[in-house]
Image (spheres, rainbow, N blue to C red):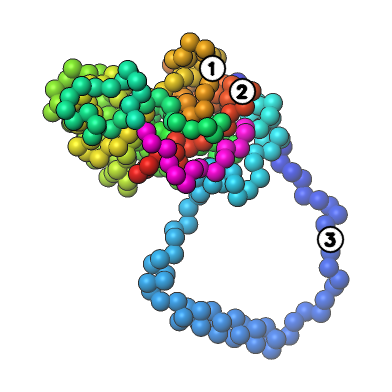
Amino acid sequence: MNPVRRNPVPRSSTAHRSPRAEPPTAATVTAALVVALGIACAAMASESPAAVDARPPASTPHPTAAAHTSARASSAVARAWGLATPPLTPPRPPTLKPAIGFRKGFEVSGPDTATLPPVFTTIPTTDKVVFLTIDDGAEKDPEFLRMTRELHIPYTAFLTDSAIKDNYGYFRRMQGTGTHLNNHTLNHRYLRGMTRDGQQREICGQQNIIQKVFGTAPKLFRPPYGAYDANTLRAAKSCGVTHVPLWNAEAFPDHMEWREADRDLHPGDVILTHFRGPTQWKAPMTDALRQILRVATDRGYALARLEDYLPTV
């Protein structure tokens, strides 16, 4: 379903007009320019090169921050994207991040287990939030970027180089909205049972590409198909990975699939979907996002950014 386009707001024909003023003389204009130049030069002289270097670069704040510094998406914007109500606003991220350990039953064996990146499906929190994660990068839908930006939707991407290398620019634009780009291997191979060296090439190779292309080596890694063994986690740790999020629910354009028997969301659940479009799913990415937002909002959950709840990320 394509989003309903919003009509531009017409300019008012009854704008306030100031009383007519006399045009300034040439002498007045010259004097004003001299004063303005003097002020600008003084400000430049007083600002040291170190101070200039210390200024933060201009960038778009990540969606969670934007939600707290501006009004949440209006009902009109939500309706324009086919939603009955706007997405719920997440709370501010916790200052003290929750401790993350292996989900029970997801552990690996070995003497070094306690030092390996934990595999989990849910963040331990009482906040009524869930976390949207999106895998691979095969579909590159500009409307999805526009929808997430206009609705202030935070999400985390796990990228496979073989799927994204034809259009790194799309993911740079995604990164510019505050989305973290994380590791999903070079070629989306089934890792469990591969040699440690083979797994290391897949994981650390992608780690290096993300750092080179996008400027930051990720801390998060998701194994393709959710398949891993102890060597997977050892390889991931060796190239800087600190956490391995899997998922507790998976979203498609027309339905959800659940890990838990109650078929419901829980505080801190990680939701998985994929970069898929009409070729694979017979629907655009915006349909999958609408499905997620409707389910989350109807059940009283806001989408928050996963990295905001993790230490060292």
Q: Residue 264 got which mark?
A: 1
Q: Is mark 1 on a helix, strand or loop?
A: loop
In the rendered image, the quadrant that contains the N terminus is top right
What residue is shown at x 48% (from left), y 57% (from top)? Answer: 58
Establish if 68 lies above or below 85: below
181 on left or right of 278: left
Q: How far apart are marks 1 and 2 (CA)?
A: 9 Å
Q: Kindly identify the amino acid type of the residue bearing the numbered disc 1.
A: Asp
Instruction: Tell me the mark number nearer the camera, choosing from 3 and 2.
Output: 2
Establish if 60 lies above or below 5: below
Q: Nearer the viewer, residue 27 or 44?
A: 44
Whether label 1 touches label 2, CB < 8 Å: yes
**Quarter-wise, where is residue 37 in the image?**
bottom right
In magenta, the rendered stretch is: 87-100
Q: Residue 299 got which mark?
A: 2
Q: Mark 3 points at which residue?
A: 16
User: Is residue 89 found inside the magenta-colored segment of the image?
Assistant: yes
Q: Which of 268 and 142 is in front in this view?
A: 268
For label 2, the crowd category at 10 Å Cα-Cα, with few meaning under 14, some 14 to 19 and many 20 or more, is: few
Q: What element carries label 2?
A: loop
Q: Where is residue 69 in the image (x, y as percent from the top left)?
A: 60, 50
303 on left or right of 199: right
Q: What element carries label 3?
A: loop
Q: Kindly identify the amino acid type of the residue bearing the numbered disc 2.
A: Arg
Establish if 84 lies above or below 218: above
